Image: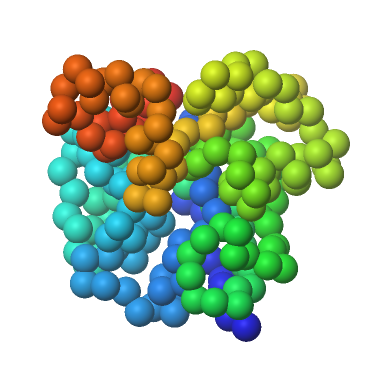
Amino acid sequence: MFIHQHPYAPFINEETEKLIVGTIPPPRFTTGELFPDDVDFCYGSRFGLLWPILERIFGHELDYENTSNSIEQRKQLLIRNGLGICDMVERCTRRRMEASDLGMQDIVLRDLPNILSAHPAIKRILFMGGASKNGPEYLFAKQARERGFKIQLTRSERPRIHELRLEERRIECVSLISPSSAANRAIGGHPQYKKMKGLDPNYTTLDFRVSQFREFLH
């Protein structure tokens, strides 16, 4: 049994307004067996698309290599744009060395409601993926219900939007398509993607993600 410990603390400061929330990085980020073009930071997998999305939206060029400079570039991009990152899972166990959310067992969650309370500037949560079992939205909804917080659906079409009532605050919770390449198949079946692909054969799944993320990152 592999103990999968999250290798990074939440990246949030007092000016963070929008919080990116996923589950946990792939196991190799816990063991330190990174590829040369991985970045030793949140969403640093060579196969992930979050940073290419943010590059396109904010016009920042990033390096893709395992260096301290690549890490600092990403931190500065987040800070300049009022973004933070706090994944839901602090640790879990796995029977196999793989990164699927469904493969997680004995999940220990980070206390996201308490983290939100400690950072009053946060007004929007951006879940990386839908409401599938063990995904970030699923885990947070379960945690919020157990703590007695109210979450109300305010938009049912994708991307879905919920509103979290936390004390006197109202925090928008948006369910964005996963930046993992594993979500490409789901995007391929999306009506809007099919429409855009029909208009432009060069339209890509990355283009689709950028168009969806842009609305909620500015």
**Most distant residue in the bottom direction:** 1
- Nearest the camera: 34 or 101? 101
Instruction: Judge from the rendering whether residue 128 lies leftward or rightward of residue 195; answer left or right.
Output: right
Judge whether 214 appears above or below 40 on screen: above
Residue shown at 17%/55% (left/top)?
Answer: 63
Residue 166, position as x, y percentages in the image: 73, 29
In the picture, measured across the screen, residue 73 lies left or right of residue 150, that is left
The residue that appears at 76% across and 40% down in the rendered structure is 144
Answer above or below: position of 125 versus 136: above
Q: Is residue 47 above or below residue 196?
A: below
Relative image position of residue 185 (x, y in whole percent) = 38, 43
Q: Residue at x 45, y 66 (%)?
A: 26
Q: Front-most of 181 and 162? A: 181
Give the x, y percent position of residue 125: 55, 34
Residue 100, percent from left and from top: 52, 61
**Viewer-closest of 88 and 12:** 88
Q: Quadrant of the N terminus?
A: bottom right
Q: Is residue 58 visible?
A: no
How many badges with numbers are in the image? Answer: 0
Quadrant hosting residue 170 = top right
Q: Quadrant of the C terminus?
A: top left
Kindly tell me whether residue 132 is visible in this rendering: yes
Quarter of the image holding residue 91? bottom right
Q: Nearer the viewer, residue 88 or 211?
A: 211
